[in-house]
Structures are given as structure tokens and as C-alpha cells.
Amino acid sequence: MLFDYLTLKLIWWLLVGVLLIGFAIMDGHDMGVGILLPILGKDDTDRRVMINTVAPHWDGNQVWFITAGGAIFAAWPFVYATAFSGMYWALLLVLFALFFRPVGFEYRSKLPNPAWRRSWDWGLFAGSAVPALVFGVAFGNLFQGVPFHLDETMRSFYTGSFWALLNPFALLCGVVSLSLLALQGATFLAHRTDGALQARARSAGLVAATVLLLSFSAGGLWVSHLDGYVIRSIPDVGGALNPLMKEVGRETGAWFANYRAHAALWLVPAVAYAGALLAMAGLDRGKTLLAFIASSLSCLAVILTAGVALFPFVLPSSTMPKASLTAWDATSSYVTLNVMLYVALIFTPIVLAYTGWAYRVMAGKVTRDYVAANDKALY
Amino acid sequence: MIDPMVVDLSRLQFAATAMYHFLFVPLTLGLSWLLVVMEAAYVMTGKDVYRDMTKFWGKLYGINFALGVTTGITMEFQFGTNWAYYSHYVGDIFGAPLAIEGLMAFFLESTMVGLFFFGWNRLSKVGHFSVTLLMALGTNLSAVLILIANGWMQDPVGAAFNPVTMRMELVDFAALVFNPVAQSKFVHTVAAGYVTGSLFVLGISSWYLLKGLHVDFARRSFRIAAAFGLAGCLSVIVLGDESGYAVSESQKSKLAAIEAMWETEPAPAGFNLLAWPNDARQANDWEVRIPYALGLIATRSVSKTLPGIKEIRAANRERIESGRLAVLALEAWRKNPGDLEAKARFQAHEKDMGYGLLLKKYTEDLTQVTPTMLDQAAHDSVPRVAPLFWTFRLMVALGFAMLALVALAFWHGMKGTFQDKPWLLRWALWFIPAPWIAIQSGWFVAEYGRQPWTVFGMLPTHLSASSLSAASLYGSISGFVGFYTVLLVAEMFLMFKYARLGPDALKAAPAPADAQAVPAHS
């Protein structure tokens, strides 16, 4: 019993952020490889090289996504329930696309038939590109507010349509996330491949970083003109609350309030820019490990930039602003947050340790010769 | 009020996707330990045949594992997408084991599975064996946490209602983790997985022996599978009995329905071996009984009585009336927090609130409840008898038939005579699907038998669903059916192809000289 409820609520906001960032860095680079698969893979061997750079790791990486989902369920059940049921078709789209990853990886090279392999290649592409795009679109909708309301029993009702989620601002955010993960994939490929494929990966990374810098900047400008949300009144945030106990208003530019209040926070978007630029420099000079680390830093900072802007909002409601879900009133009970913190403190370092070990065991470049020599043993 | 069609379709979708997921999970659970045993034999004896066995059965493991992962993501999403009110109402408790599962078990399993397949040339013998062991451990830990979550739905311990947040909240984490229902369910379920893995290896090995293929390989696989299968089968049956005992404590309605026991009988009650349950008459048209048996199995005493369905319904009717008062008092108290009289009334009836919520299926406004509604709710508080009665018996019958098979396989495996027993080999081959049928029946009994609740005695199923339209459900169910069919066809195709190839599947066709080459480190 180290922390009070308010501190736990803050810690869990950070921990959910850590899991999303972990997802973007880890699953992000194998999704990035999937996105680039049809673009950079000129023949079957190229594509096998690409796939085998992530073959031993994609499954572990995907667990960042699963665990982020589980953590949102455990720490923010209101958010899990409202967001997943409200954005039903967006979630199903991600889910159906993700179906093609495990089977795509595992089944693709088990038969030599070219049509079979081409089909799974497209499956891997869709399974990577669609989630990458939809996650950005989802964030874009958070900034605009999502049309849902709560009744007295805290049952949520979503009144928008799936197509309304695909508005121009949200699609711009989708471009941010797509280019971010493509950059992750390109820097990883540049580090783990050689020859012509590596050269193509480096060029693709430069393009992705440029698109990222442009779309991230455009998104920032656009957000400054959006109606953000502000909490007008709320009972003691250190106590047990439900979302209907506060008053919420909307103001243009309110999403910059946290940055205006704490100038040091501007460092966060600055790191996003620096990471992308450094990744470009690293790709250009052939410092591929540096490029991957810089790109990962960019993942961290882009997500954190959005999180800081929204804080303490998590899922604002456009049709019933007071029902907006925030880090103060959408959380689990004190006991659950406390127990789950201990669990996270014990197991996260263990996970990081054996993940690092797995990457060390499998380190080294994957080459065309290596794939040819281990035809039956590799993906 | 939620459209009853949406509730039914959501149940259908959940049942279909969960059962589909559980086509792959039990094989993963069982095969992972068999791989550990085979690789241990390799590490200890240094014989290549054991490495080939690990690699070959590992290939089939991988083909199966991919779909286990794929369909598992659906389960993680689906509580939120389709059971939003459930997720809100009990997420504070139920979400914890799911999140812990990801962090503690699934990470381990998924990271190690990559090294299992690709680490052969990069790890020492013992190093690779450790990876296989950790992979199996991760798989089984995963099952512990999922069954803690499911066990809590069967017997919700360690939780209390919070009127501010309008949900159940965790008060006792240890009670959640050490829930006896979850413990017996865990061993029963993973042991069923061990049987699945064993019968899979046993059946395919038998096919090789019948065809005279890969004989040494198949003989060794057969023996390992028979021994592991026997241990698994015995555990399933013993822990199935333990589960029965736990159910008699926590869910009397499920037990009475499984046994088609309409009337409360003097202890110890008889066991209906076979019967023809008739819901309309609330009686069995005919029955074949074993005297005293049920009372002994379910209560482990000769003096404890087990209530029949009629008595359970009558008792539930009283709890529903009391629960109605709790729901109404809570509404009044939340409207006017100063209304201490309402608060006291709520607290007096709080333990029955879940039963009161059962009425919301028939009317939104609990001040308008009629005696007919009370009768209806009480009647619906016990699930339909015939489906439970029959699926339970199917599960048990298959369980004993599998026990006979593995016992004979083990016996002839010890004597080394199984190769000359084509009837035994054919039995093993044709029994490959048996564990799956038994397992699906078992889950049906567990989940359908819990109706009308998602969380027993706490949250009715019809309140748990998301506020979606029936059209959305038709769309998503079509999507699942379509995608899952395509994936299943691909999976079965590869599984048959590789099972037919046998250990030859490991050999590269032209076998280049440097097949073991390790790429240069950067």
C-alpha cells in the first residue's frame, strides 16, 4: 500500500501509455515489415528474407497489443467497454485484418505454390497496414470526441456510424501512424538485411520519415484549431468517481492547454521530430541501429504527444461531454489498480529481459543465401 | 431494454468463437508437454530420433498454434465489443486475470515459441530444451489465469458492489486467485488438453504403424503418448469429479439440471444414468437410476441433501422478490443520497440484487413487476435440462472410452506388443476427434449450465450485452464464419499434408551441404 488512489490513477495512465508505446515499437516494427512487404520484396526470396527478420519475434511482439488490451480492461474498464463496443466495426476491421498475421507467417512458406505464397503475402500486408491505419484513425477521433452517452446504470450507447470515424482529420492521424510504423519497419529491415534489399529499405525509410514529419506537423496545426475538452468541475479526483459526476466544456485550442501550462512538455513533440530526423540521418549514413533506436524514440514521443494533449481525457464524448471518460473517473478501484501495479512492476522487467535475450540469440543479418540454405526450417 | 435478439446473437457469436478457439488450445496444451518429454529424451540420450520427433511434432504444433493465437485475439476483444455492460460491471475484477495472463504467461509462451522454431542452431541442447520447457510453462500458466477468470464467473468470490461506480469491485485478490472452483477447473481443463495432445500423437503414430511407415519414430511416439495420455485421462476424471463437487457447492441449479433431478430427494440422492427429461412436465418421462450415487459424488456424504429443480426455482423466486427491492432501493438512494431509509433497505437486500436484475428481462421498470413475471423469472433461473443432461453424458462416456484406450495402449506399450494389435491402432486412429468432442461438450455444460447468468448470481446474461443493433451482429457473425472457415480449411489442409509426410517433412528436398549455416553476425 505505497500509493494513494490519485497517484495510482496517474501511474496507470502512464502504464497504459507504456504498453501502447511498447506495442508501437515492438509490434510496430514487424507490422512495418508487413506494410513494406509488397513494396520492397521484389521476388519470393526477398519476401522470405523480410519475413524471416521478424519470424522469431512477431508472436512475442503481438503480445504487447494483447496485453495493452488486457491492461485497459483491468485498469480502465469504462474505456474498454465503451470504446470497443462503440467503435464496433473499426475494432472488427482490425481484428479480421490481424487474423492474417499468425497464419500468414506460419503457413506462407509451408507450400512452394506461388499463388499460395502471394495470397499470404497480401494477407500479411493487410494484417499490418490496416491496424496501423486504424489505430491512428482511432486517436484522431479521440481528439474530435466520440458520439456516445451513458445512462444512469453506466450503460454506454454509441450513436455514430462507422463511416463517420473516417473523417479527414482522423485519416490524417491514420497517415501519421501508418508512416510511423513503416519507418519502424524500414529501419529494422535496414539493420537486419543486406545488399539491394537493404538499400531499398533505407530509401523507403527516408520516404516514411518525410511523410511522418509532414503529417505530424499538419496534425499539430489542425489540432490547434479543434474544439478541445476541458473539465469545468469535478469532485475530489482522489476518490471513487463515475464519469457522470463532472462538468465538461469545449474550447478551441483546449488540447494545447497542458503544453501552455507546462512549457517543458514541448520537449515531447520535439523528441518526435528529433527522432524522425535522426532516423533519416542514420539511414542515410548507414548507421542502421541508430536509425532503429531513433525511430523507436519517435514512436514513443508521437504517442506521448497525443496523450499529453488529451490528458486527463481518454475518450471524450461529443454528444454528452460530461460522460467523457478520463484518467480520473474511468479507472478501476483502488484495490485493482494497486494489485495490478505490483503485477506490472514484477513482470515487466522479466518480459523485457527475456525479450532482449531472444533478440540477442537471433541477432545477425538474414540473407538470401541463408533463406535458400534453410528452406524447410524457415518461414 | 436491450433487444433480446442482440443478446441471443451475441451469445451465439461468443459461443461459436470460443468453441472454435478451443479447437486449437487443448492441442497446444497437450503437445507442448509432449515436446518437452521428447526433447528431454533427446538431451538425455543424444539420439537423433528424439530430436526429429521434437521437430516433427513441433511442426504440427506450429500449424495448430497459429490458429490458436489468431482466434485468441478475438476472445480478448469480444468482451469489450459485444459484452460492454459485462465489461463495465465486472471489469474491475475480471479484467485483472486477463491482463496478468498477457504479462505473465502469453509473453513467455509467444517469445519462447519463436526460439523453439528458429533457435535450434543457435542454442545449446540444454538451452533449447529450456526454451521448450518455458514455452510449455507459459501455455499452462495462460490456462491458469483464463480459468481463474472463468472460475470467477462460475463462483464470484472476493467482490463487492460499489454504488458510486455502479459496478462490482475487487475486495479480495487472494480469494479471486485461490478460488477452489477455478483450481479444479484448471486441472480438469489442462488435463483434457494433455489427453488431446496424447490422442493426436497416438492416433497419427498408429496410422504410420498401420501403414508400416517411420516405424521406429512412430513406436517411440506411441509409447510416450500412451503414458502421458494415461496420466492425463486419470487427472481429467478425478478433477472432473472435483469440479462436480465444487459445482454442488456453488451452482446447485447447474447440478440439478445436469442430473435431471426435479424433486429434492432424501439423502443420498440417486444418479440418473439415463433419462428423458421433460421441461413442460418438470419430470422425466423415464429414467434409469443408480441409487445413492449422485449424493455420494456431489456431496461426499450420506446425509447432505441436494435440492431438486422445483425447490431451487421456489427458493430463487424469493430471492428475485428480495432482489427487486434492492434494485428499487438503490435507485431511490442514488437519486437522493440523503435517503438513509433507502440505503438501509438496499443493504438489507443487497445480496439478492443480481436476482432482482433477472426481472429486467421482462420489464424495464421494476415497480411494474407482476406475479407472472416473477414466475417466469424463477422458471428461467434454471437452464433447460435436456441439452445439459445429454452433453454431460456424452462427455463422461467419451472420457471413459478414452481411458480404456490409453490404458490398453499403455499396457501394450509396456509389453511392446502394440504393433501387432491392428484393432488397437485403428481404435487410436479413429479416436483422434474424441477428446475434442468431449471438451466442447464440457464447455457447453459449464457455460450453458451457468445460464441465465454471465456471472452466477450477480449479473444476468441479458443485461451483459453491448447496446448494438441486430444488423451489426449479423454482419460480424458472417465475418467470423467466413474468415474462420477459410482459415480452418487452410489449417486442416496443411495439418493433413504434414501428418502424411511424417518426419520426411523435415528434410529439405535437395539438401544443400551448408544447411546448418549460421548467418554472419552484424
Image (cartoon, coloured by chain):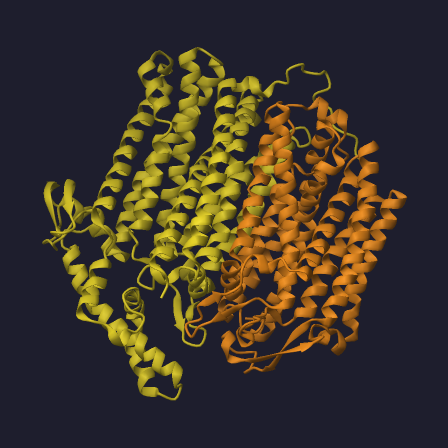
Image: A283 above or below A11: above
Query: In front here: A78 or B251?
Result: A78
Q: B341 left or right of B14?
A: left
List the single residue furthest toward the bottom: B338
Query: In front here: A176 or B494?
Result: A176
Query: In front here: B156 or A375?
Result: A375
Q: B231 left or right of B501?
A: left
Tint applied to chain A in the drawing: orange
Q: Residue at x 23, y 68 (%)?
A: B319
Is residue A2 among the parts visible in the rendering?
no
Q: B92 left or right of B428?
A: right
Query: In the figure, residue B132 lies in which quadrant?
Result: top right
* Quadrant occupied by the C terminus of chain A: top right
| Residue A286: image location, x then y, percent | 87, 42
| Residue A173: image location, x then y, percent | 69, 58
Is residue A238 among the parts visible in the rendering?
yes
Task: Please state the total of marks drawn on the protein image.
Answer: 0
Query: In the figure, residue A59 lies in which quadrant?
Result: top right
* Quadrant occupied by the N terminus of chain A: bottom right
Judging from the image, what is the letter of the chain drawn in yellow? B
| Residue B252: image location, x then y, percent | 23, 56
